[in-house]
């Protein structure tokens, strides 16, 4: 098997999606609580999206909205209850665990806490070499060459860092190691689950720049999940806003931040502290906390916190509709893009 | 202040909480200049480890008045939290050497014995931590935990304590406080837990609150709610607040004055308005530039601070930021003096921007 860096034989016809997710549902059983037996929680309920080769889709949402569950379901780390995850033309939900191993060469994930995603007793070079061994890539010399290349790619030096153990690295360096390991088998899609959230701002900027460089050099696609809206906007071509297991808005990054259609997106944007020193407008302040997904509100799930909620919102669940090319919203009463003041 | 407080809750507050009444006497009315409550001068903390001495905080100086908020901003390892713990007298006596001066209402705290310090801690000066789950006892009902704080500082009957706790829970806007009293920490969301921590901190009517990354573990929406709550409570109680954070945006919105820390020292200190208008220290500038903001063009490389914060036990000579600084010159191998401008702003840099 070849392990060259530039191996990118796109088996896809042009215009085809790299990843297609259709009606993804993930359900968990809830432990018996206050007399309710056999309760189920739909952590992800009916998500559909796609990612083209070289594209980055950002997903934002609050804690507990199902972002990470979605990431794990795409990876088949927790098998979804229903729906399709079509990666390079193959429906992953129908593959056996053994067949999935082959797919995972091209589908990798990096997590929030780099230290808990690597073995603390291993040396950096072994950590990065492991996926190559598992997938039988090359002989020891070739592998060492590849590890050197990978470390170089993420801005580390094999002579300085190769023999270190994770505890001898800083948080940013350890995240670089996790990224190098994920890149070892030349993936096409990288799922980043809060990959920069635990890093200091100066280090976070370094890793963000690295992710952008990798995307340009290797043609990578990202499914980039984070709670920081500014970080997501910065890295993504398109952004989806998630609330209680569903997307409430999806659209091109610039447009979505400039003219949000869903009241929840507006509220999220208003909550960001800014260094400009103007207190945020707070005209759509989120009064109460998100309801539990165990017992989501009827109709629109956001209606309990929505300043614009009306009777219809309780009765009828809004479906995603596209008001502009690529800009969809699931709301009965979306912001009027003509009258809403542009935000800066 | 106490009448404002009791009007928010119920009329019985004053009777239940005598401390609140005493405090009101000490405090000046809002018209008079507010008194300096906490004054930190040349605070230094050295950790004596087996093989080395780590200077974690070097020469920290600031003061906060009633009703004022100062932000201490820096990356992890810059000495923010050590400063907070040194003020609270929470550092281990065996390994941590604390020098300088910390005065509360003119009284030196560093000279106090553990026993005397306990009188102040939790009553006059309180600390709110980042992670409410780890600061709350998971096996105790939240109401009981807050009552415990009350009992440890004042003579109060169980019934009165219960009443006061419910008032405190209402004060931090926890809905159905009566029922919440009997719940355990795991039954609450992160934001609610942080509200409980704040209620506990407020239980004895503190004059100074040190909030160490109070919203870092929370979502932006919850963060906005908690910060607004803190601001309202600060106004009601005329507290001095020390806000410790890594978030420049938070500092810009919720503080009156900002001290930026790097490698255990203050590198720039100014009123929030002036700091964000005119940054003098290259580190502060670099920190601001490395945050992706909403108006930053997508995919355009962020300006990055090269390298990483120095190891405190092996600091470079001179300015600790110089190895990472774009503007570093020969002179930077000498330690810069913390200069004070006419306005009272301070910065430590040979070549300010």
Image (spheres, rainbow, N blue to C red):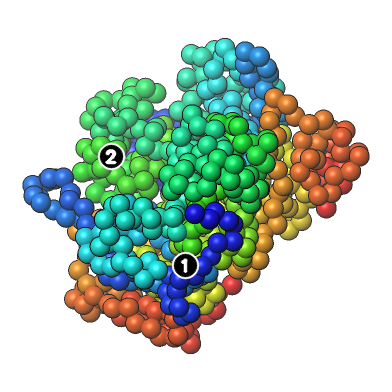
Is A334 in front, or is A329?
Answer: A329
Do discs 2 and 1 share a chain? no
Using the rendered image of the protein, determine whether residue A266 is visible from the camera's viewpoint.
no
Which subunit holds the residue at mark 1?
A: A
Corner quadrant of residue A25: bottom left
Look at mark 1 in the image and give the residue it sits on: A57
Q: Locate residue B39, reporting x and y percent.
A: 65, 31
Mark 2 lies on a secondary structure that is helix
Q: Relative to residue B196, is residue A8 depicted above or below?
A: below
Displayed quadrant of residue A22? bottom left
Side (left or right) of B93 relative to B334: left
User: Image point 49% across, 54% down: which residue?
Assistant: A1
- What is the chain identity of the residue bearing mark 2? B
Kind of element beneath mark 1:
strand
- At a point 37% along the width and 77% down the height, the residue shown is A329
Q: Position of residue B41 (x, y in %)?
A: 70, 28
In the current view of this chain or complex, which residue is farthest to the right? B330
Q: Are marks 2 and 1 in contact (CB under 8 Å)?
A: no
Above or below, B69 against A22 in this view is: above
Residue that numbered label 2 is attached to: B186
Residue B229 located left or right of residue B71: left
């Amino acid at each position: 098997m070849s392990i060259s860096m530039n191996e990118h034989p796109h088996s896809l016809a042009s215009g085809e999606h790299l990843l297609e997710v259709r009606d993804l549902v993930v359900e968990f059983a809830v432990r018996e609580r206050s007399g309710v037996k056999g309760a189920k929680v739909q952590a992800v309920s009916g998500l559909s999206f796609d990612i083209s080769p070289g594209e980055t889709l950002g997903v934002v949402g609050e804690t507990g909205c199902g972002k990470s569950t979605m990431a794990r379901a795409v990876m088949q780390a927790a098998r979804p209850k229903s729906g399709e995850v079509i990666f390079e033309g193959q429906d992953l939900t129908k593959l056996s665990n053994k067949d999935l191993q082959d797919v995972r060469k091209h589908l990798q994930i990096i997590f929030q806490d780099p230290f808990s995603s690597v073995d603390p007793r291993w040396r950096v070079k072994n950590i990065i070499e492991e996926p190559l061994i598992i997938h039988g890539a090359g002989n020891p010399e070739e592998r060492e060459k590849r590890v050197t290349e990978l470390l170089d790619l993420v801005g580390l030096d094999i002579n300085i860092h190769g023999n270190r153990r994770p505890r001898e690295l800083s948080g940013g360096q350890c995240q670089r190691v996790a990224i190098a390991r994920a890149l070892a088998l030349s993936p096409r899609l990288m799922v980043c689950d809060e990959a920069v959230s635990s890093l200091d701002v100066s280090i976070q900027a370094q890793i963000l720049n690295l992710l952008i460089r990798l995307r340009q050099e290797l043609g990578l696609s990202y499914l980039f999940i984070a709670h920081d809206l500014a970080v997501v906007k910065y890295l993504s071509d398109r952004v989806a806003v998630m609330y209680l297991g569903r997307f409430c808005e999806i659209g091109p990054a610039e447009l979505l931040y400039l003219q949000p259609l869903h009241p929840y997106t507006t509220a999220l944007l208003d909550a960001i502290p800014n260094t400009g020193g103007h207190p945020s407008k707070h005209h759509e302040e989120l009064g109460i906390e998100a309801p539990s997904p165990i017992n989501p509100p009827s109709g629109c799930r956001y209606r309990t916190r929505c300043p614009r909620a009306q009777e219809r919102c309780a009765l009828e669940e809004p479906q995603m509709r596209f008001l502009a090319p690529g800009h969809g919203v699931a709301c009965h009463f979306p912001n009027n893009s003509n009258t809403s003041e542009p935000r800066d | 202040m106490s009448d404002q407080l009791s009007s928010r809750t119920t009329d019985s507050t004053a009777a239940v909480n005598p401390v609140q009444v005493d405090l009101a006497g000490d405090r000046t009315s809002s018209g008079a200049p507010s008194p300096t409550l906490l004054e930190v001068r040349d605070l230094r903390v050295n950790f004596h480890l087996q093989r080395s001495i780590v200077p974690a905080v070097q020469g920290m100086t600031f003061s906060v008045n009633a009703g004022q908020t100062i932000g201490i901003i820096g990356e992890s390892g810059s000495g923010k939290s050590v400063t907070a713990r040194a003020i609270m007298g929470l550092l281990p006596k065996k390994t941590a050497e604390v020098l300088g001066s910390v005065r509360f209402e003119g009284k030196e705290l560093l000279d106090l014995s553990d026993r005397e310090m306990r009188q102040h801690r939790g009553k006059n000066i309180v600390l709110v931590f980042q992670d409410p789950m780890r600061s709350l006892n998971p096996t105790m009902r939240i109401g009981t935990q807050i009552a415990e704080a009350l009992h440890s500082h004042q003579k109060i009957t169980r019934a009165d304590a219960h009443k006061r706790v419910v008032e405190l829970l209402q004060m931090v806007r926890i809905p159905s406080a009566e029922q919440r009293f009997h719940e355990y920490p795991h039954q609450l969301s992160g934001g609610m837990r942080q509200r409980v921590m704040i209620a506990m901190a407020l239980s004895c009517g503190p004059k100074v609150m040190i909030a160490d990354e109070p919203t870092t573990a929370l979502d932006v929406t919850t963060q906005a709610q908690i910060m607004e709550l803190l601001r309202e409570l600060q106004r009601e109680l005329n507290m001095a607040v020390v806000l410790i954070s890594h978030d420049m945006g938070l500092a810009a919105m919720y503080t009156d004055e900002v001290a930026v820390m790097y490698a255990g020292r203050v590198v720039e200190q100014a009123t929030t308005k002036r700091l964000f208008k005119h940054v003098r220290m290259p580190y502060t500038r670099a920190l601001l530039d490395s945050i992706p903001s909403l108006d930053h063009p997508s995919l355009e490389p962020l300006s990055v601070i090269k390298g990483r914060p120095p190891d405190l036990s092996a600091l470079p000579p001179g300015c600790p930021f110089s190895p990472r600084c774009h503007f570093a010159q020969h002179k930077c191998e000498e330690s810069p003096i913390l200069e004070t401008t006419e306005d009272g702003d301070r910065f430590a840099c040979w070549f300010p921007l």
